[in-house]
Every structure is written in C-alpha cells, then in structure tokens.
Amino acid sequence: MTLYQVVFYLLAGVVLAATVLAITRRVVVHAVVYLVISFLALAPMFYLLGAPLLALLEVILYAGAIMVLFLFIVMMLPRETRAPGLGVLARQCWPAVLLTGISLTAMAVVLLSLPLAQTPVTAALASPRHFGRVLFEKYWLGVEVASFLLFVALVGAYYLGKSPEPVAEEPGESS
Amino acid sequence: MIVPNGHVLLLAVILFLLGAACAIARRNLLMILIGVEVMLNAASLAFIGAALKWRQLDGQVFVIFIFAVAAAEVAVGLALIVYSQRRTGALDADAYSRLKG
Amino acid sequence: MKILLSLLLFLPLGGSVINALLGRVLPRRVVETVACAAILGSLAAAVAVFARAWQSTYYFVILPWVQVGSFAANLSLYYNPVAALMTLMVTFVASLIHLYSAAFMREDRDYVRYFCYLNLFVFAMLVIVLADDLLFVFLGWEGVGFCSYALIGFWYDNPANADAGRKALIVTRIGDVGFGIAVALCFFLFHNLSITLINAQAATISPVLITILSLLLLWAAVGKSAQLPLTVWLPDAMAGPTPVSALIHAATMVTAGVLLLVRLFPVVSLSPLALMVIAGVGAVTTLYGAGAALGQRDIKRVLAYSTLSQVGYMILAVGAADIIGGMFHLFSHAFFKSLLFLGAGCVIQALHEEHDIFRMGNLRRLLPGVYWPFLLGALCLSAFPMIGGFFSKDRILLATYLQPGLGYKIFWLLGLIAAFLTPIYTMRMTFLAFKEQADGPAQADLKPFPRLMTWVLWPLAVLAVGDGFLNFPGGPGKDFLARFMAVVPGSRPDLGASTALEWTMGLGSGAIILAMMALAYYLYGRPGKAWAWPGGEGVLAWGFYLDYFYQQVLVKPYQALARIFWQDVDEAGLDRSFGGLAAGLLALSGGLGRWTTGRLSTYLAMLFLGLTLLVSALAVSWYLW
C-alpha cells in the first residue's frame, strides 16, 4: 500500500462524493459549490497522474473561471427560477438510474476483464516546459483554432447577453 | 506503481455516467449544463490516464483543448440560458416543447 | 360427305351465334326463323347423310384440337348406324319443338336468349351423338349440362326456377366427375381418346380395369340420365318452359347417358359385373320412377318420373347386352314422350298455367286437337299392344329374362312390375286431365293458343304409333331396325329366344297391360270423384323421400359447414384478426407517437439510451467472443 495508492483512492472518493452531492442538490448554488469541490479534488489527481500544468489549469480555468461564471449567471437569474421544486423527482430519475446502472455494469465488465487494465500505472511527470513544447510544436494549429473558437464564443455570448433594446413606436419601422 | 490502469478508467467512467445521469434527470437548464461539465471532466481524466499509460503527451494536450472548448461552450450556453429565460420566463426544460409532434 | 356432316353439326351452332350477336336488333320473326331454319337445315343434312351412308360407317377429323406432349385430342366424328338414327331423331324432334316454341314463347320477352340456348343445346347434343374423340364428347356433355341449366332456370326471376336449374347442373356435375375420371383412365390405358380405337383395343386391357372404366361410365350416365341415385334433379327440372322439358328431358339429354354406354359398348360388354350393375341400376330406377309417378299431381312431374322410368328401361337394356333394344326404346320414347310433353304444354297454356291434374277436366270436349294426339302418346307409353312402346319394352324385358343369372331374373321382375304400373299412372293422368268433370273448366275459361302448337303434335303421334313397326317381330320389315344396326359392334340382332317364349311373353304382358288400363279407368276414368289413396299420396308424391333424404344428409350439413366457415372462420376469425392487427398497429404507432414530446429532457434521455445500447452491445459481443 503505497502512498500514491492511498492518495489516489482518497482523492477518488472525494471527487465521487462531491459529484454525487452536486448532482442531487435542489438549490443550484449548492450544486455549483459542490462541483467546485469536486474539481478542486480532481486537480491533485491530475498532478498524481503526471500532468502538473493541467492540474493548475484545472483549478484556475475550470474551478476558477467557469464555475465562477456559473455562479454569476445563477445569481443573475430571478429568484423564482432557482427555487427548489425543479429538483429531482423520484419518478423522473428512474430512466437515468436504470440507464446508468446498465451502462456502468457493461463498461465495468469490459474494463476490468482487460488484461491491459490489470497492469499498474507507473508514475511519471510531464514538465510544463516539455508540455508546452509539444503543444506549440505539434498542435499549434489546434491552439490557433481554439483561440478562434473562443473568440466566436465571446462574440456570441456578448450578442446573446445584450439587453433587448426598446422597440421603436413608429409603425412601419422594422426592428 | 500507483493503481491498475483499469481503476483510473473506471473512475472516469463513473464520473461520466454521473454527469450523464444529471443531464437526464434534472429539468433545470443550469443543472443540465453542470452535468455536461462533469462529463467533460471525466473525459479529461480518461485522457490523462491514457497519456500516463502510453507515455504520450498527446493525451494531455487534448485536455487543454477540452478546457478551451468547455469554456467556450459554457459561455455561450449560459448566454443562451439567460436569453431564453428572458424570452420565456422559465428555466424548465419541459417548457421548451414547441417541437412537439 | 364431310361437308354434309359438318353442316349437320355446325348449323345449329351458327344459328345460336347469329341470334346471340344480332338477336336484339332483329325483329322477332327473323330470330325465330333463323333458329328454326338452322335446325331444319341440320335435319336436311342428316337425311342427306343418311341416304348416302346407309349402313356404312364413316370417320373423319374436322381439325386437330389439343396437342400437348404425348396427349392429342381431335375434333373427330364417327358416323355409324346408331349415330345415323340418333341424328335423324334429334334433328327431327328438335325442329318440331323449335316450331312449337315459336308459338309457345310468343308472349315472352326473352325469346332471343331462349332460342340461342335451344340451338346451342342441339349443337351440343349432336356433338355427343357424333363425336369420336372422348374429349369432344365431354365438350358436348358439358354443353348440354350448361344449356339445360340455362333453360331450366330460364325464368330466373323466380328463385325456385333458378334453384331448379342449379340443382340440375350440380347433380349432373356429380356424374360428370365420373366422366372426367373415365377420360383420364382411358388416356392412361389407351393413350388415345378415340372411341373407335378404344373399342378396338378394349379386349387387351385387364378385366379389373375394364370393370372400373365401365362403372365410371355408368356413373356419368347415371348423372346425365337421371338414374338412381342421382334422380333428384329431373322432377324439379320441370320448372323450365315445357318445350325445353320436351326436348331435353324426353328426347335428348336424358338419353345421352344411354348413348354413351352404347357407343362404348364393346368396352362395357367385356365386364359381366359392370353389365349386372348397369342392369340393376336401370331396373330399380324403372320401378322407382313408375311408383313415384303414381302419386304426382303436377302433370309435368308425372311425365318427369315417367321419363326416369323409361330411361331406366334403356339402361336395363344396355345391362342386358341388348343395345338394339335400348336404342329402339330410345326412339319410341323420344317420340311419344315429347308428344306428351308438348300436349301437356298446350293444356297448361290453355288453362292459364294450371299444372294440377286434379283441377283439370272437360278437355276432351274443349280441346279435341290436343286430346287425340295426347291419347295416342299415352297409349304408346302404356305399351298398348301392337303400337309404339309395346314392342320395344317387350324386347327389353325378353332380353333381360334371357340373360343368365338369378340377378337378371330379379331385374326382369322389377321391369315387369314397372311395366304394369305404367299404364295405371299414364291413364290416370290422361283421364283426370281430359275427362268430363262437373266442376271443371268451361270454354270461357280457356286461353286461346296458336293452332301451330297442336299441328306439330300430329307428326310425333304418327311416328310414335308407327315406330313399333320398325322392328316388328314378323311380316314384312321384320326386324328392320335390328338388321340395320347389326353392323354396330356389340349388337345382337337376334336374341336367341324361342318363338314360343316370345309369343308367351308378348301375349301375357299385353293382356295384363289391358287389364291395368281397365283398372285405371275404373279408378280414375269414370265420371265423378276420382279415387284417392287412403292415406294420402305422401310417400309416392315425394318420390319416396329421396330428395328429402339428400336434403337432410348432404345439403344441410354442407350448408352448415359453409356457414361455419363463413361466419366463424372468415368473419370472426380472419376478418377480426386482421382488424385486430390493424388496430394493434394503430395503437403501436399511437404509442410511439408519444415519444415526440418536444421536450428537451426526453431527447437527452434518448441520447443516453443510445449510448447505453452501444455499450451493452460492446459488452455482450466482448463476452461472446
């Protein structure tokens, strides 16, 4: 029982618990907070699996930016829409439970029977320098495209988020 | 020597299915998006685990892209949610049933 | 010769076709003339052929018909003395009946259809008479069956008439099955369907097969000639117009069965068992017909049962290996029976469609032109000594008596009893219809009818009476008919009876017949109330309940079965199951339609479902490998 193993299973437990709690909350803010916890627990796991930069980015980008954005929007929306009552109802979750159960069984069965899956992972670390080099040398096009994608998202989000302008009162004038 | 490969992947699978269950079972649009985020994270975990196994950095590079895409998607998705909430006044997924046959 | 024979055969067909195509646009007189002229032309051709051919035989092929693999059938004709006499008889009687029909159907609007069918019928009958190839005979066989159905059910507006026509067709059909099997068997045995060839080669086939073939032919004859057990259609067939009954059920169709057996007699005669069965059928039917005729009230039904009885005599003759006697009686019967039917038709029309003899009367005084020919015909039917039917019936009974074996003696006895019943029912009918009745019809009640209808009775009467002299046992013209037909294979001109036996039988039967006629006069002919059966005429009137028996045993179960298949299987079972299937599909599509909810959650769930299915498939195939 190495330290790595203990840490891994501990972190795995935290991630799973936090995720389960997150998806079963009736109040959206609670769910978001639990999700942040889950991501924060996932970050050390990334580090454990040899991706320190990504662990960092997980915290900064994901938990720090994306989830915060979530919180902003949740706060922005009117109170009634965030009210409980839109939670999980028993009769609504049976398809999800059923399908999840079946898929889980199937995938677990396949995964755990692979001989490949039995072999243990040996630890390694990818230095950020090395990572950056690979990213910008081999996948530079992807980086450029990703930046373009982000730009488009920015424009779209701006346009969609604009407050509706007051409609002109004169007849015959199109909006 | 950390854990068997299968366990990492299993963790990713469980996380993915949890996210899928959330997307299916919840009617609040925000919760559906949260489910999507969980799924994306699970996929990232799987990639990193695979990168470690095969000693290739390509897996980790893909995770960066996942982050970028997730960010863009969340931005636009939330903007859409706000917009549609302003238009229809409801955040209930069942309220958007104009495509009913 | 070829041309004459072809004319003889096809003129009636031509008449029928012309009337069928143009009958509606031509005036009535023209239609009738075309029909009668066709038959008269046929008669002229028959006389011409007869004059040229005399006793010789003639065979020719009109054209090849069917050629499939090793099976070949031709439209071929075989003309021999039997065919010669039959064509003369058929065309002569048919032409008289056509003339009679022109007058009888004068008030009917469907005369075109009538004359078409009548001509077509004569054509089909001539085919049976002349044809050499069995398939050609079958064509004519079916043709007469169809025409009789069409003509019996002529006034089809009344469902009873249509039922009678259907009954005739179906019952004769049952006999035709025997014919079909016989044709197939002939082809199997002889590889050829020509009658001449079959007759020549018959001796080479094993006796068992010959017996089977003969019995099949007998079955066909039983159907067409209305012998037991297929007699039930003939009494009901009286629903048709009277000239139709005269032609079809006196002279032609019912004799077709006898004719078939006679044409194929070399085959039939090789099997003693078959001959015995044939004789038995004939004898029993004879007695059955005579008995049932005693109880009938409808004048036409009396004549119908009488026909059954007389055709039974012809069949009995064939069974006694005396085809000359059978043909002799066939000719006698044709003349006097058609005479009686036509006379009955005059009476029926005069009395406004009255058929019941117990309601007739006074006609001797009121319709003398009908009375005298009718009386002559009745005397011939009763076998009054020295005229008409006496000699032919006598010869048949003699032939039966002379055949070896106890069975034939029994058949002789049955035939004899029937011969004694015949005068009773015949004179009963005659007396009741024509004698003086205080409460009978008067001159004013009669409906006038054309003189033509009585004129045609006379040639028939003359022939009926004089027919006996065709085969007079002694004097000039002795055994004329027998000698004429001697060239026909299987005929026995001389029966080999001793003169003493002949005279004894002749005198004895003549005396008893006269006694029976006196009895009939005593019961029915005296002025005043006619004698009635003590317990009513039930059994006899209903034909010994044979029809009723068939109805209960065959028809009702069949109809019940059909009803079950219709209502329970078809409607309830099939229709409802298909309806249920359709409803189920509708329900299924309705159920499926509920998936298009338009809601996001549903569609997301469907996505996940697809994923689950893929993964499960992967897992399953993983393990199956």
Image (tube, helix red, strand yellow):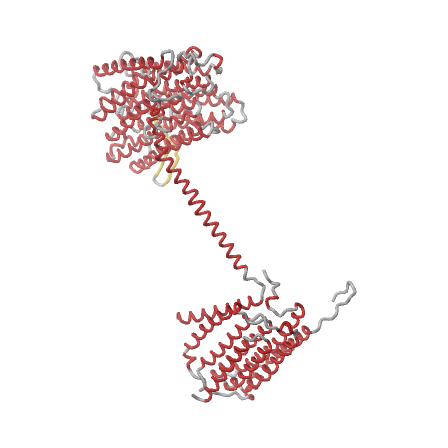
In-image side of A59 versus C259 (left or right):
right
Picture quadrant of residue B77: bottom right
Which image quarter: residue A40? bottom right
Query: Which quadrant is the N terminus of chain A positioned in?
Result: bottom left
> What is the x, y in percent for residue C364?
41, 11
Q: Which residue of the protein is positioned furthest toward the right in this rendering?
A: A170
Look at the picture and state if C1 lies above or below C73.
above
In this orientation, which residue lies closer to the viewer: A102 or C325?
A102
At x 30%, y 33%, the residue is: C216
Residue toward you, A115 or C124 = A115
Point out residue B64 in the picture as x, y percentages from the top left corner: 57, 81
Picture quarter containing residue C256?
Answer: top left
Q: Residue C394 versus residue C40: which sits nearer the camera?
A: C394
Work out whether C102 lies above or below B67: above
Front residue (pair C44, C525):
C525
Q: Is residue C83 visible?
A: no
Quadrant assignment for the C terminus of chain A = bottom right
**Which residue corresponds to the image point at 59% horizontal and 75% vertical from the top-left?**
A27
Residue C297 placement (x, y as % from top left)? 39, 21
Residue C263 higher or lower than A41, as above or below? above
Residue C574 can be seen, yes or no: yes
Q: Position of residue B92 (x, y in %)?
A: 60, 69
In the image, residue C167 sits, relative to residue B6, either above or below, namely above
User: Residue lying farthest top?
Assistant: C365
